[in-house]
Image (spheres, rainbow, N blue to C red):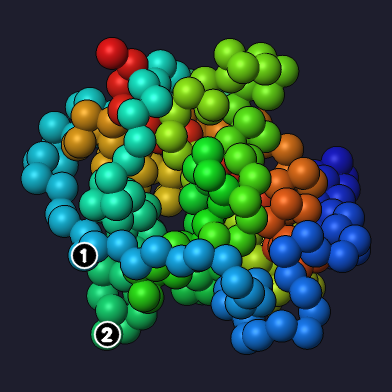
């Protein structure tokens, strides 16, 4: 009974909490891109991703959560490699990805939150498009720690946004919730293994300010920031 209430609450959250007008999406501008309208925000093409070289067994042996980060920024190549591992097209002819999704709904978008602002990643074009010029990293991680929040020390906070409209399971809210959480988990584990294979540090995060991030990203009411993941180089 409690679980049903939780599922209903989350879907209601998706449907109602963010009825306010978007900060970044004027209603009459442009073509939708993953639920967000085009506007005059910068975009950045990423270089072709490179494959991880470490054998899978070694990456599994090294997989761990680490919360100590250096502020060294990521190169575009590092970002491209990270995002492809997370949820890139590994079978582009079939439009299928490195992470599975229930019923192949591919309902999760990855937002890349940097000090300069937040970008949505378009995996087909391998392009980042800025959607908000606010630093959202501090709305993930240990939020009550202020400047000591590890998420502010790392250059990248990935935010996994579930589009419940794309998932199309509004008549089965419990399944919608279960599937969305597991689908995020697969992406999270891909990121963990990629980080292990490349000497990077990462933390998967249930702790994020859902409403604040959704508002800043200008998400439609059916999209919910579900989990986040801090990624960076190890502290020196
Ligand atoms: C669903 C989920 C939510 C998590 N949320 C947080 C979080 O909000 N903050 C945090 O510091 N770590 C978080 N973690 C990381 C766990 O604390 C970590 O995985 C756990 O301590 C086990 O350590 P290991 O990953 O090194 O095996 C989360 C992990 C999972 C799977």
Residue 173: x and y in percent read 76, 62
Residue 116: x and y in percent read 53, 44
Q: Which mark is residue 93?
A: 2
Please tell me which of labels 2 and 1 falls first in the chain. Answer: 1
Q: Nearer the viewer, residue 30 or 80?
A: 30
Q: Nearer the viewer, residue 41 or 68?
A: 41
Could you tell me which residue is drawn at 34 percent across and 67 percent down?
45
Residue 73: x and y in percent read 35, 36
Query: In the rendered image, which quarter is residue 1 located in?
Result: top right
Crowding at mark 2 (Cα within 10 Å: few <14, some 14-19, many 20+): few
In the picture, measured across the screen, residue 87 lies left or right of residue 117, that is left
In the picture, measured across the screen, residue 110 lies left or right of residue 167, that is left
Crowding at mark 1 (Cα within 10 Å: few <14, some 14-19, many 20+): few
Query: In the rendered image, which quarter is residue 138 located in?
Result: top right
Could you tell me which residue is drawn at 36 percent across and 43 percent down?
191
Could you tell me which residue is drawn at 64 percent across and 55 percent down?
132
In the picture, measured across the screen, residue 214 lies left or right of residue 50, that is right
Q: Is label 1 in a helix, a strand or a loop?
A: loop
Q: Nearer the viewer, residue 225 or 134?
A: 134
Q: Is residue 4 above or below residue 176?
A: above
Q: Nearer the viewer, residue 199 or 206?
A: 199
Q: Is label 2 in a helix, a strand or a loop?
A: helix
Q: CA distance from mark 2 to mark 1?
A: 17 Å
Is residue 229 in view from this perspective? no
Is residue 228 in view from this perspective? yes
User: Where is mark 1, residue-wise?
Assistant: 48
Q: Are marks 2 and 1 in contact (CB under 8 Å)?
A: no
Q: Is residue 161 above or below residue 40?
A: above
Could you tell me which residue is drawn at 28 percent across and 79 percent down?
92
Discs 2/1, front: 1
Residue 38: x and y in percent read 61, 77
The quadrant of the picture occupied by the C terminus is top left
């Amino acid at each position: 009974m409690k679980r049903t209430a939780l599922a209903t609450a989350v879907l209601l959250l998706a449907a109602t909490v963010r009825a306010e007008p978007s900060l970044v999406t004027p209603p009459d501008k442009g073509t939708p891109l993953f639920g967000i309208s085009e506007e005059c925000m910068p975009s950045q093409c990423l270089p072709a991703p490179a494959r991880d070289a470490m054998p899978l067994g070694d990456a599994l042996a090294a997989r761990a959560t680490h919360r100590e980060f250096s502020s060294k920024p990521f190169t575009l190549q590092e970002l491209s490699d990270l995002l492809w591992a997370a949820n890139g097209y590994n079978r582009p002819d079939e439009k299928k990805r490195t992470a599975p999704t229930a019923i192949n709904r591919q309902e999760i978008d990855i937002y890349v939150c940097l000090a300069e602002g937040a970008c949505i990643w378009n995996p087909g074009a391998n392009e980042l498009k800025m959607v908000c010029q606010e630093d959202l990293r501090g709305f993930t991680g240990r939020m009550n720690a202020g400047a000591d929040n590890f998420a502010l020390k790392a250059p990248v906070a990935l935010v996994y946004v579930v589009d419940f409209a794309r998932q199309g399971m509004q008549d089965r809210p419990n399944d919608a919730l279960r599937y969305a959480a597991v689908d995020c988990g697969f992406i999270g584990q891909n990121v963990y293994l990629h980080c292990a294979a490349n000497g990077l540090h990462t933390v998967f995060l249930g702790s994020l300010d859902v409403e604040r991030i959704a508002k800043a990203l200008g998400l439609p009411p059916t999209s919910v920031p579900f989990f986040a993941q801090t990624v960076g180089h190890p502290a020196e």
